[in-house]
Image (cartoon, helix red, strand yellow):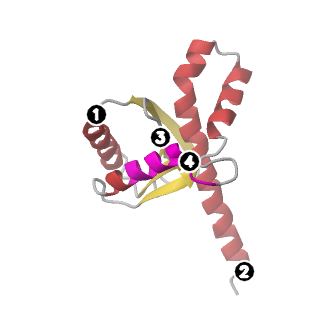
C-alpha cells in the first residue's frame, strides 16, 4: 500500500511517498506552490504515478493539540484534495516534524541554504514515517491480541 504525504505550507509543500510495502518513506522533490488548481493537479498526478492508496496531509496542530489558523488551512486544502483524488485523504498530526527535520539537517553539516531547500522534503518524510510506524505497531498489536 503506497501512501503519499504532504507537509503542507503556503509557499512550498514537502512531499514523500512510501515504498510499495508501506514500510519506508522516501522524500520527493518539494512542490513550489503556484495556483491552488495547479497544486491540486500536480498532487493528483503524483497519486496516479505512484498508484497511491492514501494521502496524508500534515496537520499543524498547536503544542496542546488544539486547532491553529494553519491547521484550518491544511484541513481546507485536504477537503479540496479529497474531491480531486480517487483515494482517502487524511489529516495527520505533524507537530514537531519541521523542528525535527531542521535538527537532523543541522547535524549533517549542510549549509543554511541547502538545509532550507531540504527541510520540507525531510519534514514530509518524517511525517510519513511516523504514520507507517503507527500502522506497523497497530498490526503488531492486533496480531498479538488475535486468538
In this image, 80 relative to 130: left or right? left
Q: Is residue 133 left or right of residue 22?
A: right
Q: Report crowding for label 4: few under 14, some 14 to 19, many 20 or more residues within 10 A (C-alpha).
A: some
**How far, Cα to Cα, is label 4 from label 3?**
13 Å
Q: Which residues are magenta?
A: 66-78
Sequence-wise, the earlier of marks 3 and 1 is: 3
Q: Quadrant of the C terminus?
A: bottom right
Residue 41: image location, x then y, percent: 27, 42
Q: Secondary structure at mark 3?
A: loop
How packed mark 1 is, by other alpha carbons closer than 10 Å (few <14, some 14-19, many 20 or more), is few
**Of the residues tagged 2 and 4, which is closer to the observer?**
4
Q: In the structure shown, which secondary structural element does the residue marked by tag 2 occupy?
A: helix
Q: What is the distance, in whole Å, between disc 2 and disc 4 at their CAs?
A: 37 Å
Q: Nearer the viewer, mark 2 or mark 1?
A: 1
**Residue lying furthest front in this view?**
69
Asked if marks 4 and 3 touch (Cβ < 8 Å), the reply is: no
Q: CA distance from mark 4 to mark 1?
A: 23 Å
Residue 76: x and y, percent?
39, 51
Residue highlighted by disc 4:
68
Q: Is residue 42 above or below residue 117?
A: below
Please give the residue where the numbered disc 2 appears in the rendered image. 145
Query: Marks 3 and 1, how far apart in space?
Result: 14 Å
Image quarter for residue 37?
Answer: top left
Which label's residue is closer to the chain start, 4 or 1? 1
Task: Name the residue beneath numbered marker 1.
Answer: 35
**Does 70 sit left or right of 76 as displayed?**
right
Q: Which of the two labelled residues, at mark 4 and mark 3, occupies the earlier sequence position?
A: 3
Image disc number at residue 8: 3
Amino acid at each position: 500500500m503506497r501512501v503519499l504525504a504532504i507537509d503542507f505550507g503556503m509557499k512550498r509543500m514537502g512531499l514523500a511517498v512510501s515504498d510499495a510495502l508501506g514500510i519506508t518513506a522516501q522524500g520527493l522533490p518539494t512542490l513550489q506552490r503556484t495556483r491552488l488548481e495547479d497544486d491540486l493537479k500536480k498532487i493528483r498526478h503524483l497519486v496516479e504515478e505512484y498508484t497511491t492508496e492514501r494521502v496524508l496531509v500534515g496537520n499543524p496542530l498547536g503544542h496542546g493539540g488544539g486547532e491553529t489558523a494553519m491547521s484550518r488551512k491544511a484541513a481546507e486544502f485536504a477537503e479540496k484534495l479529497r474531491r480531486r483524488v480517487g483515494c482517502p485523504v487524511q489529516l495527520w498530526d505533524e507537530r514537531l516534524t519541521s523542528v525535527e527535520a531542521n535538527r537532523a539537517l543541522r547535524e549533517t553539516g549542510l549549509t543554511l541554504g541547502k538545509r532550507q531547500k531540504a527541510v520540507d522534503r525531510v519534514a514530509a518524510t518524517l511525517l510519513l514515517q511516523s504514520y507507517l510506524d503507527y500502522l506497523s505497531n497497530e498490526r503488531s498489536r492486533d496480531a498479538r491480541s488475535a486468538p
